[in-house]
Image (tube, rainbow, N blue to C red):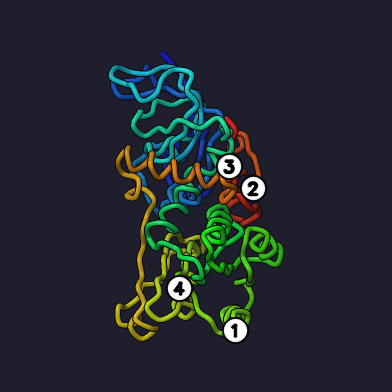
Amino acid sequence: MTQARSVQLHGFGGAEVMKVETIDIGAPAAGEAQLRQTAIGFNFIDIYQRSGVYPLPTPTGLGFEAAGVVESVGPGVTAVKPGDRVAYMNAGVGAYADRRNVAADKLVVLPDAIGDEAAASLLFKGMTAQYLLRRTYAVQPGDLILVHSAAGGVGQILSRWGKALGAEVVGTASSTEKCEIARQAGCAIAIDYSKPGWPEALLAATGGRKARVVYDAVGKDTLLHSLDLTAPFGLVVSYGAASGPAPAIAPDLLNKKGCLFLTRPSVFPHNADPETFRANAADLFAAIADGKVRIDIGARFKLDDIVAAHRAAEGRATTGAIVIQP
């Protein structure tokens, strides 16, 4: 019986509820591949699920994305073979592990130019940026776009890729230091949203120009302000809640703020079938190859230190991506 070391959750709460356990995973079933995982990605949704904001049936694993090497495949698998370097970001929770059986149609074979850590730290975040910039709203040259949490993993990708698409990118971050990171990532303007009066400061910096689209992953602390920073007939995209759940918004408020559009999309429906997933991944890989997308790995934690990884992320003590090493 094949065993794996896996982070397991038996209830919701603080980071300390996560435990590394040895579990039996067996051989890959029909349609599955067994991976030896080499790098695991961290995403803020992991915290939402661990804490119970987005509750899961327990006991459960955690984590959505990882990279690794195919060790064996089950009956009927032809898309991947043993020895292939692969990555995934939508195979169900359980990525926090050193080995795992994964549905083969959820895997994408990695190009030689993309390393395992880059894939684990870029796939979920990069695919999130891909649908936000290319599908939720197709960014055009000359657009002004506002990226909240622009120093974070997705925020840096949005800023760099948006700028490469010809947009003027402005951003917010939660400290002076993070604002500098946002500027390095492509933001022409970066404002500290932890300071009073930041929306007015942002409008002053843009000469009163408002954004065609606002990408808001902060939620509670920023969403109502996002409405005030969006140009008439513009789009507010709420795709996360780092500061807590976004407030309820009456539809009439969107009219009063300029006939705005508001959406709450997710990366998973945008990549629900294998063909679409692999096509979107190819778009991301091409952007990486062209230098439009890159991400700085801000911290690495061993699997045994997963509690410390979550605490660092919750305390906003890191910038860029967190990679978990099996």
Dot 3 crowding, Cα within 10 Å, few <14, some 14–19, many 20+ = some
At label 4, which amino acid type do we have? Arg
Dot 1 crowding, Cα within 10 Å, few <14, some 14–19, many 20+ = few
Q: Answer with mark 4 or mark 2, whichever residue precedes in sequence.
A: 4
Q: Quadrant of residue 59?
A: top left
Callout in the foreground (1, 2): 1
Callout in the foreground (1, 3): 1
Q: CA distance from mark 1 to mark 3?
A: 44 Å
Residue at the spot of label 1: 207
The reply to whether residue 270 is visible in this rendering is yes
Residue at the spot of label 4: 212
Label number found at residue 325 = none
Label number found at residue 296 = 2
Q: Secondary structure at mark 2?
A: loop
* Image side of residue 177 versus residue 23, left or right: right
Q: Quadrant of the N terminus?
A: top left
Callout in the foreground (3, 4): 4
Q: What residue is shown at x 58% (from left), y 69% (from top)?
A: 170
Q: CA distance from mark 2 to mark 3?
A: 22 Å
* Image side of residue 263 versus residue 319, left or right: left
Callout in the foreground (4, 2): 4
Residue at the spot of label 3: 307
Q: Answer with mark 3 or mark 4, whichever residue precedes in sequence.
A: 4
